[in-house]
Amino acid sequence: MELDSCFNSFWYQIVQPGDPQEVLFPYGAYLTITNVNISGNDSSSNEPVRLILHALTEASDDPNTAIPSDVLIATLIPGKSEQQVINIVISTLNSATFEIKGNIPVHVSGHLSLME
């Protein structure tokens, strides 16, 4: 897929509990994640939900070496803290997967931009 030089697009993904999901976006773009939330309709308990990002980043001095990292993106609590504004950038140099610790789906949104 070739990207237009004016490329900028909304992006979202719903991450389901018990189903780690790869973060997918076009090569030549980077993803800025700006918001995570749970829907009040999704909750039947007040147990916290944690969104974790598992990332592999290419080492700058050796492209055959990947550096793993696990990052807690947000802890959301039904009825108390159902949404968080964040600013996380993922490029195509990263391989990333979302995972939920909890029982409620998490809605993740942001925007795609062209790498320059």
Image (spheres, grey):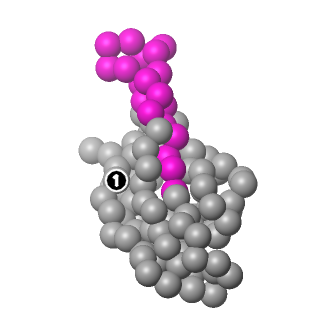
Above or below 62: residue 103: below
Q: Nearer the viewer, residue 93 or 39?
A: 39
Q: Is residue 21 visible from the viewing direction of this image?
A: yes
Q: Position of residue 13 (x, y in %)?
A: 57, 64
Query: Which class describes the residues within 10 Å of circle 1: few (<14), some (14-19), or many (20+)?
Result: few
Q: Position of residue 19 (x, y in %)?
A: 71, 53
Above or below 44: residue 18: above
Q: Is residue 110 left or right of residue 15?
A: left
Q: Disc count in the image? A: 1
Magenta segment main secondary structure: strand
- Residue linked to disc 1: 88
Q: Residue at x 56, y 50 (%)?
A: 98
Q: Is residue 98 left or right of residue 115?
A: right
61 is within the stretch colored magenta: yes
Q: Residue at x 44, y 50 (%)?
A: 72
| Amino acid, disc 1 | Ile
Q: Position of residue 54 (x, y in %)?
A: 52, 40
Position of the C terminus, as image quadrant, is: top left
Q: Nearer the viewer, residue 114 or 83?
A: 83
Residue that extends furthest to the bottom in the rendered view of this protein:
41
Q: Position of residue 77 (x, y in %)?
A: 49, 73
Q: Residue at x 37, y 71 (%)?
A: 84
Name the element at disc 1: strand
Question: Bounds of the magenta span?
Answer: 51-69
Q: Residue 62 lies in what quarter of the image? A: top left
